[in-house]
Image (cartoon, rainbow, N blue to C red):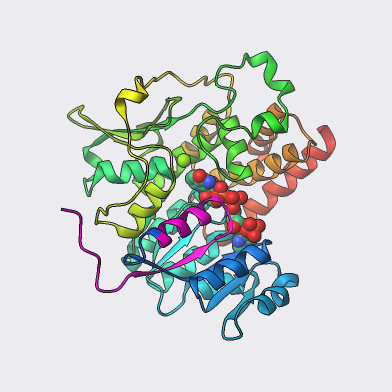
């Protein structure tokens, strides 16, 4: 029997509501009003969409990160809606008294401080923004444990693993097996990667997502970031996090237990699945999402990743294994390099060359506090920019 709805719906704050994940979260809220009530929304630049969302969901708190757009939003929404901006605005939303769950769906690391503030205020968080767990996974998970709040994974692979684990201890786990679509260049010969265009890299074979994660999926940095994300979310060492290419993106990930039994989670490719589970957890609730038809699928394929042709995976493995400030450096250099690739300042392989160079020049600090991580992030961004300006 599917669970009956709770007495009151979960009050959810959506940070990054105008993006791909944000829009999917609002779809879930529309479909499951008895389970999910959106009470606050935040975006960066899309003022019109943010105002329209605020109107539709009748929220009383919105934040537009760009301060120059604050007045515009204030003019567009009802007069009783509080409109804030900047980091402070995000933190106010993340700590709203009545909020039960904060969904962090901001691309990049801008969601880190709001996430930590939410945890500090005793709120459960649902995390799509893998970058914050790559940069500061130990800090986020440590604070969450201290405060007794939940960190619910929204990334489809991690949500799948979360479902397979169902409160199992991490020492019963032999391996976490992350599936990867392989991206648009899964079969492209290595010598052609240099010529890849932005338009080609933005054509993901199975998922429709924001630009940054789509490029990350093409380089396989997305899977690299996800390996580090998994390491922190599920408290396993890097050498127990494995990757397998699965072009159909139907098996979202798997867990191999100590008895060598493997559990997998499967569904059609729609981010509403993991978002819904994060919101209704631990309940399973009926919906109208497309069911999986095995006869129509006919086959599910698996193959080894091309470790040598796509160095992102090995760079991430190295960063996750050495730890300290290195994952933050990898993440920051990658953010800058992806932006430069999108602006056609560097080639596609230029992305991993930039990351690799910046990582090589970094002296790792162990057990970093938040300030040390923020400094390492800023320094890596600067070095990546310098390298890009110098070498292109
Ligand atoms: P999008 O680029 O589609 O959306 C990003 C969102 O973040 C937008 O709402 C944007 O606002 C907002 N934003 C950016 N900077 C700020 C800021 N400083 N303050 C407030 N809001 C901000 O990205 P996605 O939705 O694809 O991805 C979001 C995160 O989720 C990423 O970390 C990604 O890795 C992760 N993820 C995404 C998946 C997907 O299927 N899309 C799958 C798994 C993980 P605006 O639009 O106004 O600029
Ligand atoms: Mg993913």
304 relative to 162, above or below: above
Residue 108 visible within the image: no
Q: State the image quarter where residue 55 is shown.
A: bottom right
On the question of residue 222 being in view, the answer is yes
Where residue 231 sits: x, y (%)? 40, 42
Quadrant location of residue 122? bottom left
Q: Where is residue 163 in the image (x, y as percent from the top left)?
A: 28, 45
For image coordinates 42% across by 71% down, the residue present is 120
Q: How many labels does the image show?
A: 0
Q: Residue extending furthest right?
A: 390
Q: Residue at x 60, y 81 (%)?
A: 78
**Coordinates of residue 323 in the picture (x, y in percent):** 49, 43
Q: Where is residue 173 in the image (x, y as percent from the top left)?
A: 25, 37
Task: Look at the image and say whether residue 3 sits in the magenta stretch.
Answer: yes
Indicate left or right for 151 with 367 as reference: left
Q: Which residue is drawn at 69% across and 16% down?
A: 192
Question: Is 66 part of what is drawn in magenta?
Answer: no
Q: Is residue 168 left or right of residue 130?
A: left
User: On screen, 281 above or below 334?
Assistant: below
Q: Name the residue rendered at 67%, 65% in the picture.
A: 48
Identify the magenta region: 1-30
In front of the other: 248 or 214? 248
Quadrant occupied by the C terminus: top right
* Res 7 → quadrant: bottom left
142 over 316 or under it: above or below: below
């Amino acid at each position: 029997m599917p669970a009956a709805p709770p007495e009151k719906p979960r009050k959810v704050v959506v940070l990054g509501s105008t993006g791909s994940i944000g829009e999917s979260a609002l779809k879930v809220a529309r479909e499951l009003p008895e389970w999910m009530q959106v009470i606050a929304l935040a975006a960066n630049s899309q003022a019109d969409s943010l105002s329209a969302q605020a109107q539709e969901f009748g929220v009383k708190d919105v934040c537009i990160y760009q301060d120059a757009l604050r007045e515009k939003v204030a003019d567009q929404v009802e007069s009783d809606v509080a409109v804030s901006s900047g980091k402070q605005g995000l933190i106010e939303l993340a700590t709203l008294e009545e909020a039960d769950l904060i969904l962090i769906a901001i691309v990049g690391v801008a969601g880190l401080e709001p996430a930590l503030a939410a945890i500090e205020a005793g709120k459960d968080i649902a995390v799509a923004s893998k970058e914050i767990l790559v940069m500061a996974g130990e800090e986020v998970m440590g604070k969450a444990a201290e405060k007794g709040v939940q960190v619910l994974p929204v990334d489809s692979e991690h949500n799948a693993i979360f479902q397979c684990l169902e409160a199992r201890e991490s020492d019963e786990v032999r391996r976490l097996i992350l599936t990867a679509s392989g991206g648009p260049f899964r079969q492209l010969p290595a010598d052609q990667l240099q010529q890849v265009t932005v338009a080609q890299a933005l054509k993901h074979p199975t998922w429709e997502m924001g630009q940054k994660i789509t490029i990350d999926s093409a380089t396989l940095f997305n899977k690299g970031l996800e390996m580090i994300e998994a390491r922190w979310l599920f408290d396993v060492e890097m050498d127990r996090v494995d990757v397998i290419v699965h072009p159909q993106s139907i098996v979202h990930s798997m867990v191999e237990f100590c008895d060598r039994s493997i559990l997998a989670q499967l569904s059609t490719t729609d981010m509403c699945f993991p978002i819904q589970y994060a919101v209704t957890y631990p309940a399973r609730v009926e919906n109208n999402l497309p069911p999986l038809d095995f006869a129509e699928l006919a086959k599910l394929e698996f193959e080894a990743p091309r470790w040598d042709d796509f160095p992102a995976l090995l760079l991430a493995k190295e960063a996750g294994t050495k730890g300290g400030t290195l994952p933050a450096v990898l993440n920051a250099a990658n953010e800058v390099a992806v932006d430069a690739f999108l602006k056609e300042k560097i080639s596609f392989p230029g992305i991993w060359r930039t990351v690799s160079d910046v990582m090589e020049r970094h002296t790792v600090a162990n057990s970093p506090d938040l300030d040390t991580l923020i400094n390492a992030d800023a320094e890596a961004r600067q070095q990546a920019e310098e390298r890009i300006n110098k070498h292109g």
